[in-house]
Every structure is written in C-alpha cells, then in structure tokens.
Amino acid sequence: MSKVSKLFKGSSSSSSSSKAKHHHRSKGGPSAQEAIHRLRETEEMLTKKQEYLERKIEQEIATAKKHGTKNKRAALQALKRKKRLEQQLAQIDGTLSTIEFQREALENSHTNTEVLKNMGFAAKAMKQVHQNMDLDKIDDLMQDITEQQEVAQEISEAISRPFGDTFDEDELLAELEELEQQDLDDRMKSMGGLPSVPNSKLPSRHGPRPSESKTSTKKRVEEEDDMHMLASWAT
C-alpha cells in the first residue's frame, strides 16, 4: 500500500472517529446550563464588538469633520467607512436581540423543567406518605376524636354546675322590695305618721308682729317645722 493510500486511509479513519465522537455528543446533547453559559459568553463578545464599532464610528465622524471641504476625498472615505461600521453595528444589534430571546427562552424552559422535576419528586414523596394510610381508619379516628370532645364538654359542664338549691332571682328581688317597704312603714309609724296640713294661711316668716302673743308665735313656729318635715318626706 502506498504512503498516499495510507495517508488517505488514516485521514478517513480519523474523520470517522471524529464523526463518531460528534454523534456521541449530539446524542447526549449539551445541558441547559452549559447552553445558557455559551449564550452569555456570546452576548458579552458581541457587546464588546458593539462598543468597539461605536468608538470607530465616532472616530470616522471626527475624521470627516477634520477634513471637511479641505480634503473631500478623505472626508468621503471616512463617511463610507462610517456607513459600513453602522451596518455591522445594526447586524450585531439584531444578533444580540436574537441571542437574548433564545437565552431567555432556554432559561424559562430550564426553570420549568426543574419545577416539574421537583413537583414530581414531591408527588412521589406524598404518595409514599399516604401509602400506609387507610381512609376507613382515618374516619374512625376522627369519629372517636369527636366523641371524646363531646364527653369532655359534658364533663366540663357538670363540673361547673353549682351545687345546692337554685332560686328564682325575680322572686328574691320582689321579696327584698317588700322588706324595704315594710321597714319604711315601720319607721313612719314610730314617728307618729305624717302630720296634718293646716287649713289656715301660714303667717309671714319675717318675724311676729308687735300685736302677736308669745303663744301664737310658738304655735306658728311648730307648724312651720311640721311643714318642712312633710316636704322633706315627700321628696
């Protein structure tokens, strides 16, 4: 076999080996985190390129202003370069928008995948917890708890119930009012009852006239005292 055949044979075997490795990687596929990391690196690279183009555009504008009408050829060349740089900048802007959209979609997909994975894990755990539970036993347990609560309530009511005879509070209040009225009657009787109201006109309180005797003055004073006492009882 010639050296050339060996060379092509080696090249073909190397190529097939490379294809096998590539096929193996594509079968497994990159992880979501790896793809997101690659997209972020691409974004950073394009952003730096964008900043570089913006600086170059400013330089070409300054060059065009510098030459102006003095050197129109140089000024026009600077403006042409500026136009080409602006086209590249517009392309980078579009590429960045596409990459950003793809990265956000991938991040959302990765988040949803992790959420679903954790929800599935929680569902399996819940199933494992409920596996040893019997609904009939749970119903019986809840019924027993309800019955025991009712028994505890009856015991509490029995303990808090007062001992001895119970009396009607209204009857006791009525009896108390009768006793107070009886006591008031007894005090009135001990004082001789209410004094009689005199029919004659009461004399003036400015003192006895010179013609009144001492007996009539004393009687008038007693009658005034009786009237004051009567007024105080009435109130």
Image (cartoon, rainbow, N blue to C red):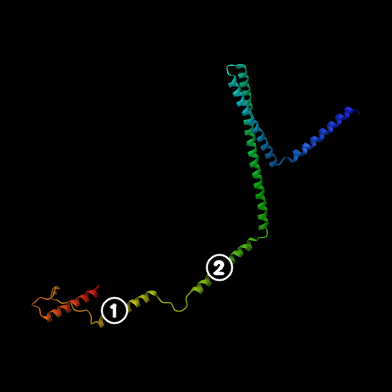
Residue in front for this viewpoint, 109 or 61: 61
Which tag, 2 or 1, sits closer to the chain's start?
2
Q: Which corner quadrant of the image does residue 175 belong to?
A: bottom left
Percent of width and height locating residue 74: 62, 18
Q: Which corner quadrant of the image does residue 232 belong to?
A: bottom left
Rounded to the nearest angstrom, the CA distance separating label 2 from label 1 is: 55 Å
Percent of width and height locating residue 27: 75, 39
Q: Is mark 1 on a helix, strand or loop?
A: helix
Disc number placed over residue 184 in the picture, else none: 1
Residue in front for this viewpoint, 204 or 184: 204
The residue tagged 2 is: 149
Callout count = 2
Percent of width and height locating residue 33: 69, 42
Percent of width and height locating residue 114: 66, 46
Give the answer, above or below, for where 155 lies relative to 127: below
Which quadrant of the figure contains the C terminus?
bottom left
Amino acid type of the residue that numbered disc 1 sits on in the rendered structure: Leu
Amino acid type of the residue that numbered disc 2 sits on in the rendered structure: Gln
Give the answer, above or below, for where 212 lies relative to 78: below
Using residue 202 as the reference point, say whether residue 32 is left or right of it.
Answer: right
Which quadrant of the figure contains the N terminus?
top right
Using residue 131 as the reference point, say whether residue 175 is left or right of it.
Answer: left
Give the answer, above or below, for where 54 lies relative to 211: above
Residue in front for this viewpoint, 165 or 84: 84
Using residue 105 as the reference point, say whether residue 227 is left or right of it.
Answer: left
Q: Which residue lies furthest to the left in this view?
A: 211
Q: Which corner quadrant of the image does residue 204 belong to?
A: bottom left
Q: What element carries label 2?
A: helix
